[in-house]
Image (tube, rainbow, N blue to C red):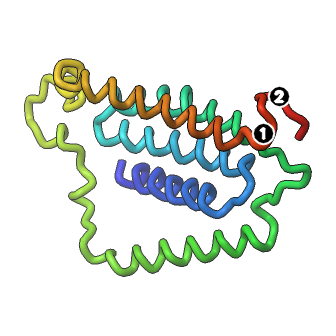
Amino acid sequence: MTYFMFLLLVALVVGLVAVASNPTPYFAALGLVVAAGVGCGILVGYGGSFLSLVLFLIYLGGMLVVFAYSAALAAEPFPEAWGSRSVAGYVLVYLLGVVLAAGLFWGGWYEGSWVVVDGLKEFSMLRGDVSGVAVMYSFGGAMLVICAWVLLLTLLVVLELTRGLSRGTLRAV
Protein backbone atom coordinates (compact mmCIF):
# COMPACT_ATOMS: atom_id res chain seq x y z
CA MET A 1 0.00 0.00 0.00
CA THR A 2 2.92 2.33 0.67
CA TYR A 3 4.23 1.95 -2.88
CA PHE A 4 0.77 2.57 -4.31
CA MET A 5 0.36 5.76 -2.27
CA PHE A 6 3.85 6.86 -3.32
CA LEU A 7 2.89 6.29 -6.96
CA LEU A 8 -0.30 8.35 -6.48
CA LEU A 9 1.66 11.19 -4.88
CA VAL A 10 4.16 11.21 -7.76
CA ALA A 11 1.26 11.27 -10.23
CA LEU A 12 -0.24 14.21 -8.30
CA VAL A 13 3.03 16.15 -8.58
CA VAL A 14 3.24 15.37 -12.32
CA GLY A 15 -0.37 16.52 -12.81
CA LEU A 16 0.26 19.75 -10.91
CA VAL A 17 3.41 20.41 -12.94
CA ALA A 18 1.38 19.82 -16.10
CA VAL A 19 -1.15 22.43 -14.96
CA ALA A 20 1.44 24.99 -13.89
CA SER A 21 3.76 24.68 -16.87
CA ASN A 22 1.36 24.81 -19.78
CA PRO A 23 0.19 28.17 -21.16
CA THR A 24 -2.66 26.75 -23.26
CA PRO A 25 -5.93 25.85 -21.56
CA TYR A 26 -6.45 22.65 -23.56
CA PHE A 27 -3.51 20.71 -22.17
CA ALA A 28 -3.74 22.36 -18.76
CA ALA A 29 -7.30 21.01 -18.48
CA LEU A 30 -5.99 17.48 -18.97
CA GLY A 31 -3.43 18.02 -16.21
CA LEU A 32 -6.17 19.45 -14.01
CA VAL A 33 -8.34 16.35 -14.50
CA VAL A 34 -5.38 14.07 -13.75
CA ALA A 35 -4.48 16.04 -10.62
CA ALA A 36 -8.09 16.03 -9.35
CA GLY A 37 -8.54 12.30 -9.98
CA VAL A 38 -5.24 11.36 -8.36
CA GLY A 39 -5.94 13.67 -5.41
CA CYS A 40 -9.26 11.92 -4.85
CA GLY A 41 -7.45 8.57 -5.08
CA ILE A 42 -5.07 9.73 -2.35
CA LEU A 43 -8.03 10.69 -0.16
CA VAL A 44 -9.56 7.24 -0.69
CA GLY A 45 -6.26 5.63 0.28
CA TYR A 46 -6.21 7.57 3.54
CA GLY A 47 -9.78 6.69 4.47
CA GLY A 48 -11.85 9.59 3.15
CA SER A 49 -13.97 7.80 0.58
CA PHE A 50 -17.08 9.98 0.96
CA LEU A 51 -15.06 13.20 0.93
CA SER A 52 -13.19 12.17 -2.20
CA LEU A 53 -16.44 11.25 -3.97
CA VAL A 54 -18.03 14.59 -3.10
CA LEU A 55 -14.87 16.47 -4.12
CA PHE A 56 -14.62 14.60 -7.42
CA LEU A 57 -18.25 15.13 -8.34
CA ILE A 58 -18.41 18.78 -7.34
CA TYR A 59 -15.04 19.75 -8.76
CA LEU A 60 -15.22 17.94 -12.06
CA GLY A 61 -18.95 18.47 -12.43
CA GLY A 62 -19.04 22.16 -11.63
CA MET A 63 -15.79 24.03 -11.98
CA LEU A 64 -14.47 22.11 -14.97
CA VAL A 65 -17.56 23.13 -16.94
CA VAL A 66 -16.69 26.78 -16.29
CA PHE A 67 -13.08 26.10 -17.24
CA ALA A 68 -14.13 24.39 -20.48
CA TYR A 69 -16.42 27.31 -21.33
CA SER A 70 -13.68 29.86 -20.78
CA ALA A 71 -11.20 27.71 -22.74
CA ALA A 72 -13.65 27.59 -25.64
CA LEU A 73 -13.83 31.38 -25.71
CA ALA A 74 -10.05 31.72 -25.58
CA ALA A 75 -9.41 29.35 -28.49
CA GLU A 76 -5.99 29.39 -30.14
CA PRO A 77 -5.42 28.08 -33.66
CA PHE A 78 -1.97 26.65 -32.81
CA PRO A 79 -1.72 25.82 -29.10
CA GLU A 80 1.63 24.97 -27.54
CA ALA A 81 1.92 21.32 -26.51
CA TRP A 82 4.08 19.71 -23.83
CA GLY A 83 6.76 18.99 -26.42
CA SER A 84 7.50 22.62 -27.26
CA ARG A 85 10.69 24.18 -25.94
CA SER A 86 9.17 26.84 -23.69
CA VAL A 87 6.81 24.40 -21.97
CA ALA A 88 9.55 21.78 -21.59
CA GLY A 89 11.74 24.43 -19.95
CA TYR A 90 9.00 25.21 -17.45
CA VAL A 91 8.49 21.50 -16.75
CA LEU A 92 12.20 21.03 -16.04
CA VAL A 93 12.33 24.06 -13.74
CA TYR A 94 9.27 22.94 -11.77
CA LEU A 95 10.48 19.34 -11.47
CA LEU A 96 13.90 20.58 -10.36
CA GLY A 97 12.20 22.68 -7.68
CA VAL A 98 10.20 19.65 -6.50
CA VAL A 99 13.34 17.49 -6.35
CA LEU A 100 15.22 20.17 -4.39
CA ALA A 101 12.33 20.57 -1.94
CA ALA A 102 12.09 16.78 -1.53
CA GLY A 103 15.83 16.60 -0.87
CA LEU A 104 15.52 19.34 1.74
CA PHE A 105 12.70 17.60 3.66
CA TRP A 106 13.70 13.97 3.00
CA GLY A 107 14.99 13.12 6.49
CA GLY A 108 11.66 13.51 8.30
CA TRP A 109 9.65 10.93 6.33
CA TYR A 110 9.22 7.43 7.65
CA GLU A 111 7.17 4.55 6.35
CA GLY A 112 5.11 4.40 9.54
CA SER A 113 3.69 7.84 8.85
CA TRP A 114 1.83 6.52 5.80
CA VAL A 115 -0.60 4.42 7.88
CA VAL A 116 -4.28 5.36 7.87
CA VAL A 117 -5.61 6.35 11.29
CA ASP A 118 -8.39 3.76 11.11
CA GLY A 119 -5.79 1.02 10.71
CA LEU A 120 -4.39 1.77 14.17
CA LYS A 121 -7.60 0.83 15.99
CA GLU A 122 -8.06 -2.82 16.81
CA PHE A 123 -11.85 -3.06 16.70
CA SER A 124 -12.92 -0.23 14.47
CA MET A 125 -16.60 -0.46 13.52
CA LEU A 126 -16.83 2.77 11.53
CA ARG A 127 -14.54 4.52 9.15
CA GLY A 128 -13.35 8.02 10.04
CA ASP A 129 -15.28 9.74 7.28
CA VAL A 130 -18.65 8.24 8.26
CA SER A 131 -18.84 10.29 11.44
CA GLY A 132 -17.49 13.28 9.53
CA VAL A 133 -20.46 13.13 7.15
CA ALA A 134 -22.88 13.56 10.04
CA VAL A 135 -20.93 16.52 11.38
CA MET A 136 -20.76 18.07 7.91
CA TYR A 137 -24.52 17.90 7.49
CA SER A 138 -25.35 19.06 11.03
CA PHE A 139 -22.85 21.88 11.63
CA GLY A 140 -21.74 22.55 8.07
CA GLY A 141 -24.96 24.00 6.66
CA ALA A 142 -23.73 27.58 6.81
CA MET A 143 -20.44 26.59 5.19
CA LEU A 144 -22.36 24.81 2.42
CA VAL A 145 -24.31 28.00 1.69
CA ILE A 146 -21.10 30.07 1.72
CA CYS A 147 -19.37 27.61 -0.64
CA ALA A 148 -22.34 27.64 -3.03
CA TRP A 149 -22.28 31.45 -3.03
CA VAL A 150 -18.51 31.49 -3.73
CA LEU A 151 -18.93 29.04 -6.62
CA LEU A 152 -21.69 31.21 -8.11
CA LEU A 153 -19.53 34.31 -7.72
CA THR A 154 -16.60 32.50 -9.36
CA LEU A 155 -18.83 31.51 -12.28
CA LEU A 156 -19.94 35.09 -12.80
CA VAL A 157 -16.39 36.46 -12.54
CA VAL A 158 -15.03 33.94 -15.07
CA LEU A 159 -17.87 34.63 -17.49
CA GLU A 160 -17.32 38.38 -17.15
CA LEU A 161 -13.58 38.06 -17.71
CA THR A 162 -13.95 35.91 -20.81
CA ARG A 163 -16.69 38.04 -22.34
CA GLY A 164 -14.30 40.36 -24.15
CA LEU A 165 -15.42 43.45 -26.02
CA SER A 166 -18.58 41.99 -27.52
CA ARG A 167 -21.78 41.88 -25.48
CA GLY A 168 -22.89 38.29 -25.96
CA THR A 169 -21.72 34.77 -25.29
CA LEU A 170 -21.67 34.00 -29.01
CA ARG A 171 -18.97 36.00 -30.73
CA ALA A 172 -16.54 35.64 -33.60
CA VAL A 173 -13.34 34.07 -32.33
Residue shown at 81% from the left, 37% from the top: 166
Q: Position of residue 21 (x, y in %)?
A: 64, 63
Q: CA distance from mark 1 to mark 2?
A: 9 Å
How many residues crowd around disc 1 within 10 Å: few (fewer than 14), some, or many (20 or more)?
some
Residue 170's x, y, as percent?
Answer: 83, 28
In the image, is residue 97 above or below residue 70? below
Q: Which mark is residue 106?
A: none
- Among numbered discs 1 and 2, the one appearing first in the sequence: 1
Provide the residue designation for mark 2: 170
Q: Left or right: where does residue 90 sit relative to residue 62?
A: right
Disc 1 marks which residue? Answer: 73
| Residue placed most toward the observer, 32 or 161 | 161
Kind of residue at disc 1: Leu
- Res 50 → quadrant: top left
| Secondary structure state at the residue bearing disc 2 | loop
**Label 2 amino acid?**
Leu
The residue located at (27%, 68%) in the rendering is 109
